């Protein structure tokens, strides 16, 4: 294997492919058993641990990322990958390698599956103490509104991340009035989750003085996973105990959704898109 800093996306993709093949039967059973609500699967030990540790060490500082802070969410994001160490961009696009996409297509039985080279809403994310992501539905489409967003890939890279640390993915498969399922953001774990009109999910607050780092991708399709799904903006709600916040977020979503009916691609350009040199 090449030295870690010089690893190319094809090298990383080959390692990812190897792990998916090893776990293929297990993760297919996991996804098929959950897809009637919110389909998901996860793979632990995705990469050799020394590679994932190195990737985490190359994460930008929070000063080099963009803070998204509101009653909806509180987190840092990074999407302009050419501003960061090369290995981070190589890893992101390893998940877009045809070999990886085709395997996940088989596991999830989705005939038409395409990655997003623009990293619309993808890229890097980092959450420190007290940061969170409230329950929400992801935007239903890509930035041009041509394809449906169907899968969310989350790769967690923070070493020694304990279950007690918080910062975990929560899926509300029975709705926001029922108890959520927690998928822990453990080191070197990849979680793949279906996104559609019932895919309410959130991230629990981080409760320790440390950063939970994640590398994310979305896959898109010409057909939505739900036959009754319609275009929607990212839609937030409060947690069950956040009655006032829930009311405010309902109004917020209503206003943003109606603005998008008038301005099909939004009033302002979404900054959460990778503008590489070739663009």
Image (cartoon, rainbow, N blue to C red):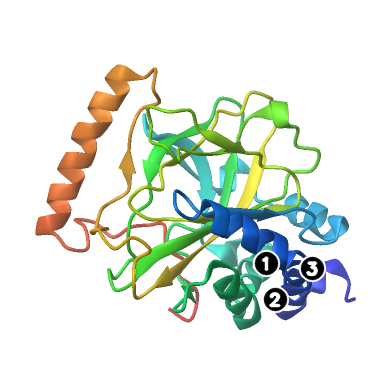
Secondary structure type for disc 3: helix
User: Which of the 4 image quarters holds residue 150?
Assistant: bottom left
Q: Residue at x 44, y 48 (%)?
A: 37
Q: Dot 2, how many residues are within 10 Å of its Cα: few (below 14), some (14-19), or many (20+)? A: many
Q: Marks 2 and 1: in contact by CB < 8 Å?
A: yes
Q: Is residue 153 visible?
A: no
- The label on residue 91 is 1
Above or below, 101 relative to 190: below
Q: Residue at x 33, y 66 (%)?
A: 143
In this rendering, the label closer to the viewer, 2 or 3: 3
Above or below, 261 relative to 115: above
Left or right position of 153 against 231: right
Q: Residue at x 32, y 48 (%)?
A: 234
Q: Is residue 14 visible?
A: yes
Mark 3 lies on residue: 22
* Residue 177: % across, % down: 37, 27
Q: Dot 3, how many residues are within 10 Å of its Cα: few (below 14), some (14-19), or many (20+)? A: few
Q: Residue at x 61, y 29 (%)?
A: 206
Mark 2 lies on residue: 9
* Residue 43: % across, % down: 71, 56
User: Which of the 4 image quarters holds residue 168?
Assistant: top right
* Residue 167: % across, % down: 60, 34
Secondary structure type for disc 1: helix
Above or below, 43 relative to 187: below
* Residue 85: % across, % down: 69, 62
- What separation in Å lies between label 1 and label 2 (alpha carbons)? 6 Å
């Amino acid at each position: 294997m090449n030295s870690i800093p010089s690893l190319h996306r094809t090298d990383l993709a080959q390692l990812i492919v190897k792990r998916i093949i090893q776990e293929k039967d297990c993760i297919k059973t996991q996804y098929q058993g959950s897809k009637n609500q919110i389909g998901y699967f996860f793979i632990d030990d995705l990469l050799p641990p020394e590679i994932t540790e190195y990737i985490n060490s190359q994460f930008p500082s929070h000063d080099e990322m963009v803070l998204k802070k509101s009653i909806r969410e509180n987190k840092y994001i990074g999407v302009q990958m050419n501003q960061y160490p090369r290995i981070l961009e190589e890893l992101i696009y390893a998940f877009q390698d045809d070999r990886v996409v085709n395997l996940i297509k088989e596991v999830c039985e989705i005939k038409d599956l395409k990655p997003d080279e623009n990293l619309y809403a993808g890229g890097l994310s980092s959450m420190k103490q007290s940061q969170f992501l409230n329950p929400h539905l992801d935007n239903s489409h890509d930035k041009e509104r041509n394809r449906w967003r169907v899968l969310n890939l989350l790769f967690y890279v923070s070493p020694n991340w304990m279950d007690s640390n918080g910062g975990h993915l929560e899926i509300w498969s029975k709705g926001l009035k029922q108890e959520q399922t927690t998928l822990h953001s453990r080191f070197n774990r990849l979680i793949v989750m279906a996104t559609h009109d019932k895919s309410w999910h959130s991230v629990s607050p981080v409760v320790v003085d440390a950063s939970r780092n994640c590398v994310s991708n979305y896959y898109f399709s010409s057909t939505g996973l739900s036959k009754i799904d319609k275009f929607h903006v990212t839609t937030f709600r409060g947690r069950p105990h956040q009655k006032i916040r829930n009311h405010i977020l309902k109004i917020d979503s209503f206003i943003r959704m109606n603005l998008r009916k008038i301005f099909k691609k939004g009033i302002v350009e979404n900054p959460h898109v990778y503008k590489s040199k070739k663009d």
